[in-house]
Amino acid sequence: MQSHSVRALALVATVTACSDFPEPETLDAAPLYGCYVATGSPTFAVTAKGVRITGAGAAIPYRYETHKIGAVLKMPVVAEVVGGKSTFQRSEDHFYRVLFVEGQPVIRVAFGKEGNLSNYVRYTSSDCRT
């Protein structure tokens, strides 16, 4: 009888803990619009019509969301290392952390299984070659 009470209490505690975090919420992506550059990695542009990756062709849909860890860019792209080069490949949805440093957005991308971290900073020029 006592083990049933312990299990019930554990279930209630789990359900209560999970309810403390709000569901992801879509944010206005306008503050992110621009061209992003990281050393040794492909550039990309965040626009109202999607993310355009250098050499990838069509714009890729995305969502700018807030999660319990903070703001993220959610898009169907995985960051890979192919032949020793960082690249983006179409995939299921992946999340990329968005931070603001001195008021400017920085998008953190971990490439490959090793998680080679690139901090993408917004380039001030309107000439983004994607």
Image (cartoon, helix red, strand yellow):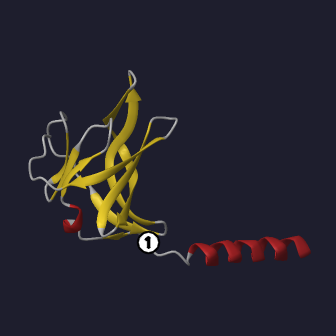
- Quarter occupied by the N terminus: bottom right
Which image quarter: residue 97? Answer: bottom left
Residue 1 visible here: no
- Could you say which is closer to the camera, residue 7 or residue 71? 71
Which image quarter: residue 48? Answer: bottom left
Q: Which residue lies furthest to the left in this view?
A: 127
Residue 96 visible here: yes
Q: Which residue is drawn at 75% across and 72% down?
A: 10
Q: Which residue is the site of mark 1?
A: 23
Q: Is residue 41 positioned above or below 70 on the image?
A: above
Residue 52 left/right relative to 5: left
- Could you say which is closer to the camera, residue 53 or residue 9? 53
Q: How crowded is mark 1: few (under 14 residues within 10 Å), some or many (20 or more)?
A: few
Element on which disc 1 rests: loop
Q: Residue at x 90, y 75 (%)?
A: 2
Amino acid beneath label 1? Glu
